[in-house]
Amino acid sequence: MKKIWFLIISLFMLINVSSALAQSSQDEINDSSVQFEEWAKTLSEFVKDVRFNEKDVQNLISQWDDFNSFGEEQDTDEEKYIDFNSILNDSAYRSWAQSRGFDSDEWLKKTMRIMTMIMRTQIEASKSESQFDMTAQLAEIEKMRAQVGEEMYLQMKQAMAAGAAAMQGIDNSYKHLPVPTDSEKILLIKYNDQLMNLE
Protein backbone atom coordinates (compact mmCIF):
# COMPACT_ATOMS: atom_id res chain seq x y z
CA MET A 1 0.00 0.00 0.00
CA LYS A 2 2.95 2.34 0.47
CA LYS A 3 3.27 2.26 -3.30
CA ILE A 4 0.31 4.64 -3.53
CA TRP A 5 2.09 7.23 -1.43
CA PHE A 6 5.33 6.59 -3.35
CA LEU A 7 3.61 7.50 -6.60
CA ILE A 8 1.91 10.61 -5.23
CA ILE A 9 5.03 11.87 -3.51
CA SER A 10 7.06 11.26 -6.67
CA LEU A 11 4.72 13.48 -8.66
CA PHE A 12 4.74 16.21 -6.02
CA MET A 13 8.55 16.09 -5.93
CA LEU A 14 8.61 16.73 -9.66
CA ILE A 15 6.82 19.99 -8.97
CA ASN A 16 8.75 21.06 -5.90
CA VAL A 17 12.15 20.57 -7.53
CA SER A 18 11.09 22.00 -10.86
CA SER A 19 13.76 24.69 -10.71
CA ALA A 20 16.41 21.97 -10.87
CA LEU A 21 14.89 19.85 -13.62
CA ALA A 22 16.65 19.53 -16.96
CA GLN A 23 14.79 19.62 -20.29
CA SER A 24 15.77 16.00 -20.93
CA SER A 25 13.55 14.92 -18.02
CA GLN A 26 10.35 16.43 -19.39
CA ASP A 27 9.53 13.38 -21.51
CA GLU A 28 9.84 11.23 -18.39
CA ILE A 29 7.53 13.58 -16.52
CA ASN A 30 4.99 13.47 -19.34
CA ASP A 31 5.14 9.67 -19.44
CA SER A 32 4.70 9.43 -15.67
CA SER A 33 1.80 11.87 -15.80
CA VAL A 34 0.02 9.84 -18.47
CA GLN A 35 0.55 6.61 -16.54
CA PHE A 36 -0.72 8.18 -13.34
CA GLU A 37 -3.80 9.55 -15.11
CA GLU A 38 -4.63 6.13 -16.54
CA TRP A 39 -4.19 4.57 -13.11
CA ALA A 40 -6.46 7.25 -11.59
CA LYS A 41 -9.15 6.25 -14.08
CA THR A 42 -8.73 2.59 -13.15
CA LEU A 43 -8.83 3.44 -9.45
CA SER A 44 -12.01 5.49 -9.85
CA GLU A 45 -13.68 2.65 -11.72
CA PHE A 46 -12.59 0.17 -9.06
CA VAL A 47 -14.17 2.06 -6.15
CA LYS A 48 -17.22 3.54 -7.88
CA ASP A 49 -19.76 1.05 -6.49
CA VAL A 50 -18.81 1.29 -2.80
CA ARG A 51 -19.13 3.91 -0.06
CA PHE A 52 -17.46 3.78 3.33
CA ASN A 53 -18.91 4.41 6.78
CA GLU A 54 -17.35 5.04 10.18
CA LYS A 55 -16.87 1.33 10.89
CA ASP A 56 -14.94 0.95 7.65
CA VAL A 57 -12.60 3.80 8.60
CA GLN A 58 -12.10 2.36 12.08
CA ASN A 59 -11.38 -1.08 10.61
CA LEU A 60 -8.81 0.37 8.24
CA ILE A 61 -7.01 2.20 11.03
CA SER A 62 -7.01 -0.80 13.38
CA GLN A 63 -5.98 -3.27 10.68
CA TRP A 64 -3.54 -1.03 8.83
CA ASP A 65 -0.30 -2.50 10.12
CA ASP A 66 -1.28 -6.05 9.15
CA PHE A 67 -2.79 -4.95 5.87
CA ASN A 68 0.21 -2.79 5.02
CA SER A 69 2.59 -5.65 5.78
CA PHE A 70 0.65 -7.81 3.38
CA GLY A 71 0.85 -5.05 0.78
CA GLU A 72 4.63 -4.85 1.13
CA GLU A 73 4.90 -8.52 0.26
CA GLN A 74 3.05 -7.76 -2.97
CA ASP A 75 5.34 -4.83 -3.93
CA THR A 76 7.76 -6.52 -6.26
CA ASP A 77 8.22 -3.61 -8.64
CA GLU A 78 7.71 -0.05 -7.41
CA GLU A 79 7.53 1.26 -10.95
CA LYS A 80 4.23 -0.48 -11.55
CA TYR A 81 0.89 0.67 -10.24
CA ILE A 82 -1.29 -1.50 -8.04
CA ASP A 83 -3.13 -4.18 -9.98
CA PHE A 84 -6.40 -4.52 -8.08
CA ASN A 85 -7.57 -7.65 -9.88
CA SER A 86 -4.24 -9.33 -9.18
CA ILE A 87 -4.64 -8.65 -5.47
CA LEU A 88 -8.25 -9.85 -5.44
CA ASN A 89 -7.21 -13.08 -7.13
CA ASP A 90 -4.35 -13.66 -4.72
CA SER A 91 -5.14 -16.56 -2.38
CA ALA A 92 -2.94 -15.13 0.38
CA TYR A 93 -4.88 -11.88 0.37
CA ARG A 94 -8.22 -13.69 0.40
CA SER A 95 -7.08 -15.81 3.32
CA TRP A 96 -5.95 -12.70 5.17
CA ALA A 97 -9.31 -11.00 4.66
CA GLN A 98 -11.30 -14.11 5.58
CA SER A 99 -9.29 -14.61 8.79
CA ARG A 100 -10.45 -11.18 9.91
CA GLY A 101 -14.05 -11.61 8.87
CA PHE A 102 -13.86 -9.26 5.89
CA ASP A 103 -15.30 -9.71 2.44
CA SER A 104 -12.10 -9.56 0.39
CA ASP A 105 -13.61 -7.64 -2.54
CA GLU A 106 -15.47 -5.13 -0.39
CA TRP A 107 -12.56 -4.59 2.01
CA LEU A 108 -10.10 -3.74 -0.76
CA LYS A 109 -12.57 -1.50 -2.58
CA LYS A 110 -13.54 0.42 0.55
CA THR A 111 -9.93 0.70 1.65
CA MET A 112 -8.93 2.05 -1.74
CA ARG A 113 -11.87 4.47 -1.70
CA ILE A 114 -10.71 5.86 1.64
CA MET A 115 -7.14 6.15 0.35
CA THR A 116 -8.45 7.78 -2.84
CA MET A 117 -10.20 10.46 -0.80
CA ILE A 118 -7.01 11.11 1.16
CA MET A 119 -5.14 11.31 -2.13
CA ARG A 120 -7.69 13.79 -3.45
CA THR A 121 -7.33 15.97 -0.37
CA GLN A 122 -3.54 15.98 -0.66
CA ILE A 123 -3.67 16.88 -4.34
CA GLU A 124 -6.09 19.74 -3.63
CA ALA A 125 -3.74 21.15 -1.00
CA SER A 126 -0.65 20.70 -3.17
CA LYS A 127 -2.27 22.19 -6.27
CA SER A 128 -3.04 25.55 -4.69
CA GLU A 129 0.37 25.76 -2.99
CA SER A 130 2.30 24.70 -6.08
CA GLN A 131 0.39 27.09 -8.32
CA PHE A 132 1.37 29.95 -6.03
CA ASP A 133 5.00 28.81 -5.94
CA MET A 134 5.11 28.45 -9.72
CA THR A 135 3.82 31.98 -10.26
CA ALA A 136 6.32 33.39 -7.78
CA GLN A 137 9.19 31.45 -9.33
CA LEU A 138 8.34 32.67 -12.84
CA ALA A 139 8.35 36.25 -11.59
CA GLU A 140 11.73 35.73 -9.94
CA ILE A 141 13.21 34.21 -13.08
CA GLU A 142 12.13 37.22 -15.12
CA LYS A 143 13.79 39.55 -12.61
CA MET A 144 17.03 37.55 -12.78
CA ARG A 145 17.21 37.36 -16.58
CA ALA A 146 19.75 40.12 -17.03
CA GLN A 147 21.89 38.89 -14.14
CA VAL A 148 22.09 35.19 -15.01
CA GLY A 149 22.45 35.52 -18.76
CA GLU A 150 20.29 34.25 -21.60
CA GLU A 151 21.54 30.63 -21.54
CA MET A 152 20.88 30.15 -17.83
CA TYR A 153 17.58 31.99 -18.16
CA LEU A 154 16.42 29.58 -20.89
CA GLN A 155 17.49 26.57 -18.81
CA MET A 156 15.49 27.85 -15.86
CA LYS A 157 12.47 28.43 -18.10
CA GLN A 158 12.78 24.89 -19.42
CA ALA A 159 12.85 23.57 -15.89
CA MET A 160 9.74 25.55 -15.08
CA ALA A 161 8.05 24.10 -18.15
CA ALA A 162 8.83 20.61 -16.84
CA GLY A 163 7.33 21.56 -13.48
CA ALA A 164 4.24 22.91 -15.20
CA ALA A 165 3.91 19.62 -17.09
CA ALA A 166 4.00 17.73 -13.80
CA MET A 167 1.33 20.02 -12.37
CA GLN A 168 -0.84 19.48 -15.42
CA GLY A 169 -0.45 15.73 -15.08
CA ILE A 170 -1.66 15.87 -11.49
CA ASP A 171 -4.57 18.11 -12.48
CA ASN A 172 -5.58 15.73 -15.27
CA SER A 173 -5.50 12.79 -12.86
CA TYR A 174 -7.36 14.68 -10.14
CA LYS A 175 -10.35 15.18 -12.43
CA HIS A 176 -10.89 11.42 -12.59
CA LEU A 177 -10.89 10.82 -8.83
CA PRO A 178 -14.33 10.28 -7.25
CA VAL A 179 -15.80 12.96 -5.00
CA PRO A 180 -16.60 11.97 -1.40
CA THR A 181 -20.20 11.97 -0.25
CA ASP A 182 -21.24 14.37 2.51
CA SER A 183 -21.05 11.62 5.12
CA GLU A 184 -17.62 10.53 3.86
CA LYS A 185 -16.36 14.12 4.08
CA ILE A 186 -17.39 14.25 7.75
CA LEU A 187 -15.52 11.02 8.47
CA LEU A 188 -12.41 12.17 6.62
CA ILE A 189 -12.32 15.31 8.77
CA LYS A 190 -13.03 13.41 11.98
CA TYR A 191 -10.31 10.82 11.40
CA ASN A 192 -7.91 13.03 9.44
CA ASP A 193 -5.04 12.90 11.94
CA GLN A 194 -5.19 9.12 12.31
CA LEU A 195 -5.47 8.50 8.58
CA MET A 196 -2.62 10.87 7.75
CA ASN A 197 -0.38 9.16 10.31
CA LEU A 198 -0.77 5.73 8.74
CA GLU A 199 2.67 4.46 7.67
Image (spheres, grey):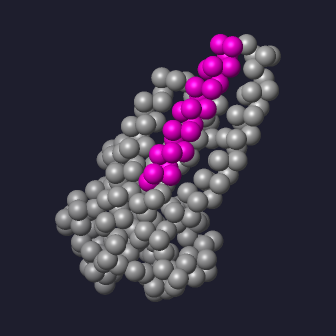
Query: From what the image shows, is residue 128 above or below residue 117?
Result: above
State the image coordinates of residue 176 (x, y, percent, origin top left). 41, 60
Camera sees residue 58? no
Residue at 53% x, 82% y: name it.
182
Residue 33 lies left or right of residue 102; in this view the side is right
Q: Residue at x 60, y 73 (%)?
A: 192
Badge count = 0
Query: Is residue 193 highlighted in magenta?
Result: no
Instruction: Estimate the x, y position of residue 30 in percent, counting from the top left.
Output: 43, 37
Report which quarter residue 163 is drawn in: top right
Q: Residue at x 51, y 38 (%)?
A: 165
Q: Give, as a single range, the part of the protein colored magenta.
A: 150-173
Taken as a whole, is the magenta stretch helix, strand or loop?
A: helix
Residue 184 vs residue 82: left or right? Answer: right
Q: Give whichever of 82, 143 is nearer the camera.
A: 143
| Position of the N terminus by quadrant | bottom left
- The answer, for residue 162, to whether it is visible in the render is yes
Residue at position x 38%, y 75% from top?
Answer: 110
Q: Quadrant of residue 175?
A: bottom left
- The verdict on residue 151 being magenta is yes
Give how far across and how far down residue 160 sits, in percent: 61, 32
Q: Position of residue 88 (x, y in %)?
A: 24, 67
In the rendered view, tell whether residue 178 sits above or below residue 149. below
- Lateral position of residue 48 relative to residue 8, left or right: left
